[in-house]
């Protein structure tokens, strides 16, 4: 074969590879999480890219636990967000020592951390806000209560997610009860603005929680988790999505079923030794979640995220 022919074949192969990388196709079966190394135990993870180009992960644990990575592949523990504790949260914790489901993001030159205080089976719950200039352990300042729920309410104030765009700041949250809710926030403080609360999704008496709102193209996508978490390898958590023309809904799944009527398009569920993949977050073209291994421990899961020709997401 001539040198010119060899060069042409190599160039064609490289072009095909680049095109394939640019236009991924939906896999026939759910892919396993991408390989991550180091300290990868995590539950209810949320990730932000740092100013230095690395990554900061916040997740459920005593006083909110943190991990860092320079390359998103190898992770190391970075201590607790609140090493001195959170006495303001104790009225909601009961016998529970963990703070739940942090949502971490970066706005206005500082890191924002919304997180939950509650105990299993109770909707006497609260969502708080803290901010930090660096995101490091011990650098977080309590900014106060954002929203709470009482046992007389029909919602549960846990699993917060902040969404920011030109239309304002919104906090989406909720678990069980009547499902996923949304409130407005004051951009100047990050705290609640007004008394309105709207419902975005629900499943009646069936489990739904862990909302995450993100815009892609012209649609707003509401990610949620269906079914049961926190049962180790017996967990039935699965990651679902719906979309809307507005960040306030109405959201519907691919079949057109409203999410307020139990709709949701499945993105990933348990497969092989990956159990209960859920409590998802989206960072650019990545889906971040936790899953349980056969032994029952929870780990950080990361997959690449793409959208098909009709604008519906999938992982690969």
Image (cartoon, rainbow, N blue to C red):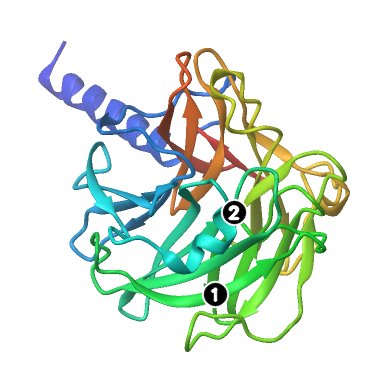
Residue under label 1, please give it: 145
Specify few, some or many for label 1: CA neighbours under 10 Å numbering under 14, 14-19, or 20 or more: some
Q: In which quarter of the image is the N terminus?
A: top left
Front one among 199 and 175: 175
- For mark 2, give the secondary structure: loop
- Position of residue 286 relative to residue 118, above or below, is above
Q: Earlier in the sequence, mark 1 or mark 2?
A: 2
Front one among 16 and 134: 134
- For mark 1, give the secondary structure: strand
Left or right side of 235 for 4 = left
Residue under label 2, please give it: 118
Left or right side of 206 for 297 = left
Q: Residue 17 carries which label?
A: none
Residue 62: give x, y in percent of width and height: 39, 48
Residue 82: give x, y in percent of width and height: 32, 61
**Residue 250 lies in quadrant:** bottom right
Front one among 210 and 256: 210
Front one among 239 and 114: 114
- Position of residue 143 relative to residue 269, above or below, is below
Residue 194: give x, y in percent of width and height: 69, 86
- Position of residue 82 relative to residue 311, above or below, is below
Q: Residue furthest left?
A: 3
């Amino acid at each position: 074969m001539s040198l010119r022919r060899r060069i042409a074949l190599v160039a064609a192969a490289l072009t095909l590879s680049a095109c394939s990388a640019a236009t991924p196709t939906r896999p026939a079966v759910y892919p396993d999480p991408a390989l991550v190394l180091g300290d990868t135990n995590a539950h209810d993870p949320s990730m932000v890219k740092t100013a230095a180009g690395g990554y900061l992960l916040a997740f459920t644990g005593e006083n909110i636990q943190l991990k860092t990575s320079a390359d998103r592949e190898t992770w190391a523990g970075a201590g607790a967000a609140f090493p001195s504790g959170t006495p303001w949260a104790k009225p909601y914790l009961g016998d529970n020592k963990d703070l739940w489901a942090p949502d971490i993001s970066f706005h206005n030159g500082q890191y924002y951390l919304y997180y939950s205080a509650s105990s299993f089976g109770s909707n006497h719950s609260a969502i708080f806000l803290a901010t930090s200039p660096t995101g490091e352990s011990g650098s977080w300042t309590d900014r106060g209560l954002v929203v709470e729920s009482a046992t007389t309410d029909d919602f549960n104030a846990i699993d917060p997610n902040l969404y920011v765009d030109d239309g304002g700041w919104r906090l989406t949250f909720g678990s069980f009860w009547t499902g996923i809710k949304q409130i407005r926030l004051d951009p100047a403080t990050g705290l609640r603005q007004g008394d309105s609360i709207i419902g975005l999704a629900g499943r009646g008496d069936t489990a739904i929680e862990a909302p995450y709102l993100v815009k892609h193209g012209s649609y707003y996508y509401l990610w949620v988790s269906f079914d049961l978490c926190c049962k180790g390898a017996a967990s039935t958590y699965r990651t679902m999505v719906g979309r809307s023309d507005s960040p306030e809904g109405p959201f519907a799944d691919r079949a057109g079923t409203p999410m307020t009527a139990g709709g949701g398009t499945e993105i990933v569920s348990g497969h092989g030794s990956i159990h209960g993949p859920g409590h998802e977050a989206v960072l650019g073209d990545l889906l971040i979640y936790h899953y349980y291994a056969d032994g029952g421990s929870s780990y950080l899961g990361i997959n690449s995220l793409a959208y098909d020709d009709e604008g519906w997401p999938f992982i690969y």
